[in-house]
Amino acid sequence: MFIPLVFWLLLLGALAIGWQAGDRQDRRIIVAIVTVSIVTALSDLFVGGRASLVLVGIADIALLIVVTRYALTSRKHWPVWFAGIHTAGVLFGIAALFFPEGERLILDYVSAFWAIPALIAMVLGLLADQRAGIVNETS
């Protein structure tokens, strides 16, 4: 119960800082990150088991595609770091599908762990980009 609470507090803090420091395109990605987090929580709460892993995996892969596309078109640096860190989480989540229950839970927790460094990279990157004056052309 403690770790999910820490995650949600960190997510809300990242949302607040990111909303202030980011531009409109950054905010769209932040909304996608929050949406995937909510889908993950609801999936764990109402679906559970391997079906939940598949649903979360689909949501995480969709987020990875969105963030990677943004990283390739943006002048900002944080999407590159977020996409790289999120890739580790996605790979552990995919690996969890192929293991028995006990090992699956370990891989599932390791996959979830990567969300925290990704959020930290997002916040620090947005603040650094804001301080450096980096903006996207269409902001």
Image (cartoon, grey):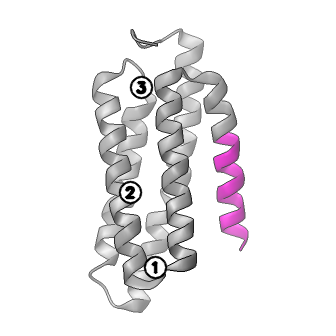
Q: Amino acid at mark 3?
A: His
Report the side of 49 relative to 3 (left or right): left
Give the SS element for disc 1: helix
Q: Amino acid at mark 1?
A: Ile
Provide the residue designation for mark 2: 60
Residue 77, disc: 3
The structure residue drawn at horizontal position 54% and vertical position 78%, both measured from the top left corner, is 46
Task: Determine which quarter of the picture holds residue 7.
Answer: bottom right
Looking at the picture, how far across and down is residue 72, in whole percent?
28, 28
Looking at the picture, how far across and down is residue 39, in whole percent?
50, 61
The structure residue drawn at horizontal position 73% and vertical position 70%, both measured from the top left corner, is 2
Q: Amino acid at mark 2?
A: Asp
Q: Mark 3 vs mark 1: which is more N-terminal?
A: 3
The crowd level at tag 2 (other Cα within 10 Å; few <14, some 14-19, many 20+) is: many
Q: Magenta stretch: give its range.
A: 1-14
From mark 2 to mark 1, how far is it between C-alphas?
A: 18 Å
Task: Determine which quarter of the picture holds residue 73.
Answer: top left
Q: Let me know if residue 125 is in the magenta part.
A: no
The crowd level at tag 3 (other Cα within 10 Å; few <14, some 14-19, many 20+) is: some
